[in-house]
Image (spheres, coloured by chain):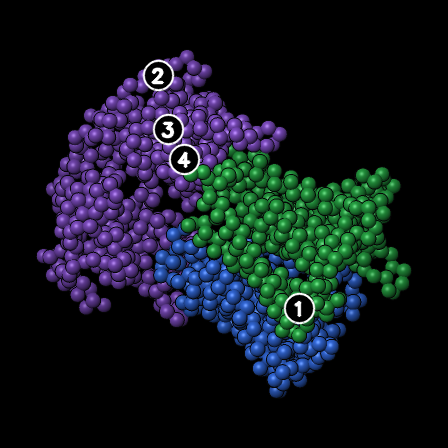
Amino acid sequence: MSTLALPAGLDRNALLKRLLQLAVPLGATAAALVIGLLLIAISGRSVADAIEAFMDGAFGSAFAIGASINRAVALALVGLGFILAFRANLTNVGGEGQIAMGGIAATAMALHGGVASLPLGPAVLLPMLAGCVAGAAWGGAAGYLKVRFGTNEVISTLLLGFIALLLVYWSVQSENLLRQPRTSSSTLPESLPIPEAAQLPALTPFDESPLHIGLAICVVAAIFTAILLSRSTYGLKLRAVGLNELAARRAGMPCNLLLISALAMAGAFGGLAGAIMIQGEQYYLKAGFSSGYGFDGLVVGLLSRGSAIGVLAGALFFGFLRSGGISMEIMAQVPAALTLVIQGLIVIAVAGSVILLEKLETR
Amino acid sequence: MGAAADITIDTARAAEGRPLLALEGVSKRFGKLQALSEISLDFKAGEVHCLLGENGAGKSTLCNLIFGSHAPDTGLMRFQGREWSPSGPAEALQSGIAMVHQHFSVVPRMSVVENLMLGQARGRLRHREQAALIRAMTAKFGLDVNPDAIVGELSVGERQRVEIVKCLMREPRLLVLDEPTAVLPPEEIGALLDIVRRVADDGRAVILVTHKLAEIAKVADRVSVLRGGKLVTSLPMQGTQMGDLVRAMVGREVTSLESALASSLAGIARAEKQGDGPHKYALVCDGITVRDAGGAVRLDNFTLEIAPGEVVGLAGVEGNGQTELGRVLAGLSPPTSGRFFIGEAEMTHASAAQITAQGAGIVPEDRHAVACVTGMSLAENIFLNKLGQFTRFGLLNRTALTEAAKGLMQDYDVRAAGPEIAFGSLSGGNQQKAVLGRELTLDPLVFLLAAQPTRGLDIGAVEAVYRQIRLAASRGVGVLLISSELDELIAASDRILVLYRGKVVGEKPARPDQREAIGALMSGHA
Amino acid sequence: MDENLAVFIASTLRLAMPLILAAAGELVSERAGVLNLSLEGMMLTAAFFGALGSWATGSPVLGILCAVLASFVVSVVQAVLSVHWRANQLVVGIGFNILALGATTLLYRIIFGGLSREEIPGLAKLAIPGVSDLPFIGPALLQQSVLVYFGLACVVLIWWMLKSTAFGLSIRAVGDDPRAADKAGIPVARIRFQAVLIAGVMAGLAGSFLSVADINTFTENMTNGAGYLAIAAVIFGGWTVWRTLGACLLFGAATALQFQLPAIGIEMPTALLLMLPYLLALLAVAGVVGRRDPPTALTLPFIRGK
């Protein structure tokens, strides 16, 4: 009897199990989409029109695709950071705050760091670096609180997240910080636009596509994360600390450093996402610029079950879902809130199906 | 109040004739192991009945049968004259049998009263009435417990008293205490024994499981000795000589294990004591003292020198300071006072990593908590402390790691489907051989601590473990072997120190003819 | 000045009230070991259904019932998923928040359509006869919505329940040491389930306070983070009832001050005031101000024998 050629280390049973594991979240997603379509039908709009508008908004033009992917880039970076920290059994709930800190730092660096006169490379990289550092500090702070005071990182990252959002608010409210000079009573509470030199170069030669090199950076980050988690000694140590801190310590691993660095790295990824959002698309800082990205990114990270490719796939899916939803509202009069409904249902369904996966694994 | 007391005394008197609990030919088998065979015993109200025996003699199994955690395979139990076959601990508690386990189940952040009401109270809590009840009870039995104290802030002894109060609140006819003194610091043991005495004097039956003869002498009315699942003897305490009990407990024909071990290890050359190695001593402990969080002394002025190539056995019933010593030597928590050196370098406050680098291999007693990460692969666990050897530019060379793991699996006879298999899926013996292999392949290796290295292993694995330890010694490694298995210590060590209540109470050569003397020291009968 | 103070106290109480209601319920749930990030979603759902019920029936009381029922349903699903199915509490909570924001916005557009800012029948203010006309105290404290008095009674009830009933004792035990509680015969899953439902009911009251009792209308995303603020209040309150109540009042005062300070001529960054609650909560969990530890088993699912 000849057996089917299978990747090394996988027998047929294991493969079947993998497929089933993939089938559960996909099934949950499909179910949520069906419910969404049903809702459209119930509300009396044409389902066909809605789907057409959705596809048009998500994939219909170079602009649509570019915007969706740009959105996905930010989600993916937060998700990658999440799975990094999660490898050490740390749940980073503070993605949104880390984006916010990255956004503040990148804006400040772009406006006041003298980058406008620098050549293209440093002018773009310095604000991004500032974003990474600020995000890392925000994430690392939670790590420090954990090893120093034993503070639960779920609670500290959540609270640090809200503080960061209000720091953004503060930054754009006060002219002493980043608010643009008030010239009239209608001057908005926003920063000045960042100089052109600091804006991310476009990735494609097409004028209409907003796609920028953030995508390339994100792919590099995903490869880096995948290698770090599956190939590096550091990744293995993170896993050891996460599974059994005492044994890791006995084996001579610097546990505190590992925990802090894991959260700092997660934060750096969030900060990078914030910088890319400012430098790539938004160009100026305003309150609530990161709204929803942090939690969406967390969800992408958690649903990926620790795989970098899973993060990319989930981020793209959510990115296109949001863009398509906006288009549905404009073109088919279906409120964009519907995509929120679908997304919420997906998150709940996938999270709730964990018990099914557990049963699969123990079988 | 007076009437109630009279009734208690009356019942006690009436019960004098017939036993409260009777075991008739009870047997229990776990897989291949015959844990209990044909035990017949009576337990009477008003009596403290001590069950004495070494590890694995079947004492805990017997308690679990009585408490309903397990059911006997054959034989009959009678409780208060009726056939006793409880469906589980819940029925036992309801019928008047309570048990104090070695592991407490109290909620640390709640007060004593709250813990006692948990699962008992319905509707509104009556803190004050309950506290008064507890005070009355604690006064009656001499239990020193403050009902309003937060359990997490209490010492181990106080927590144990909470457990006892919890049992007594149910007004049990029979109270079972499984090794209650094992977790206690020495100065709390006396108080516990007083309580046990008073509970029995109140007309209840008490079963006290213990290793320690001194305790028996103080409280027992009757002593039953178990050995290898069989009842050796059951005597009234009055008129019984301690020496007889020691002999009943430990003195006996040489077992197959002991002779097998002895002959297996005999072929391994003993190293020259005064070697020409780089070190004069493998390990020096200078007055190591450990106090627990409550300030109680757990290890008292422990001093020891181990030469290269020497295997020193540290005998003692578990809970007499071995755990604390192990943690200190592993670099997990520094001693309260005293110093220790590995290969002449002071390591008192060194980290685990520094201790490893200095050449100390550690096989800790709690394998799952300290020695391995069960969720990772066998290969990863084998090289958990040597990952740097397989790392280039931060990347792990998995091929090399797997190959090296295969080599070590062969050298140390670790049997598994492959190095990539999850460590947790291995048998205890193979896990231990892997851990031992990891620690013995440290370079340099000066000293090895092996704490309870054969716990839970089958006989083949036991032999393999000691073989590797002796082989290491023959290469000039100094070994500290901590075990409560006397046979194994005698077969594998050069000399034996006995730890009792945190103190070294004696030193004997590791010879079979010293068995009784060492056994007596271990049980506090010097 | 006096008048300013009276307005300040009244608005503090008004702003703190939804926090107090939601935090009291969340406190119960967290003491049992379940962290509901979905508190925000529950409140938003309740605010919407409260408004809807009140608008459809013309009765604010029925509206509040609708709100509580809607929030209760959300909490049942949250409890089934996170307690019985052992799903990640945080992710389920986030999912509900996204869902609630989407669903309430969607339904609002569908049902109320073009009618924006539909005024709904609101809950009457209860002026306590005799004393409510007292100068200063009257307007500040005693002319509040009925729901305020009811809510405060609920807080007292929850405090008493946690401290003095066997149920409360069980809740604390399953949050701190589910294994020991299990051994003592406490049905861990059932107690946690019930605790989450209590959070749901209280979040329902909190949400309906926003739409039915306070501003008499529903607006999209009208909770705007109040649920998270309530969670921060529980944290700053160190998981005890009275300190949590104090935290809610403090947070309410901070929010009220951002409108009051300019009125009396003090310039202060409003961001700092708004940040204060989270900053204080962070300092509290870090142990800088009177360290309190969360329930030991917070966010951890319980599986017997593991």
State the CA–CA distance, disc 2 to disc 3: 24 Å
Please tell me if label 3 and label 1 are on a single chain: no
Q: What element does badge 1 sit on?
A: helix
* Neighbours of disc 2 within 10 Å: few (<14), some (14-19), many (20+): some
Q: Which mark is residue B271?
A: 2
Regarding residue B497, the answer to whether it shows in the image is no
Residue B328 image offset from top left, x and y in percent: 43, 34
Q: CA distance from mark 2 to mark 4?
A: 36 Å
Between residues C87 and A250, which one lies in front from this camera angle? C87
x and y, in percent, of residue A267 in the image = 66, 47
Alpha-carbon neighbours of circle 4 within 10 Å: few (<14), some, or many (≥20)? few
The residue under label 3 is: B413
Q: Which chain is displayed in green in the rendered image?
A: A
Task: Check contact, mark 4 vs mark 1: CB within 8 A.
Answer: no
Callout 3, which amino acid?
Asp
Ranked by sequence position, the earlier of labels 2 and 3 is 2
Q: Give residue A158's position: percent from left, percent from top.
A: 62, 55
Report the front residue among C30 and B202. Answer: C30
Q: Which chain is blue?
A: C
Which quadrant of the structure image shows residue A295?
bottom right
According to the picture, the residue beneath numbered tag 4 turns out to be B417
Element at label 3: loop
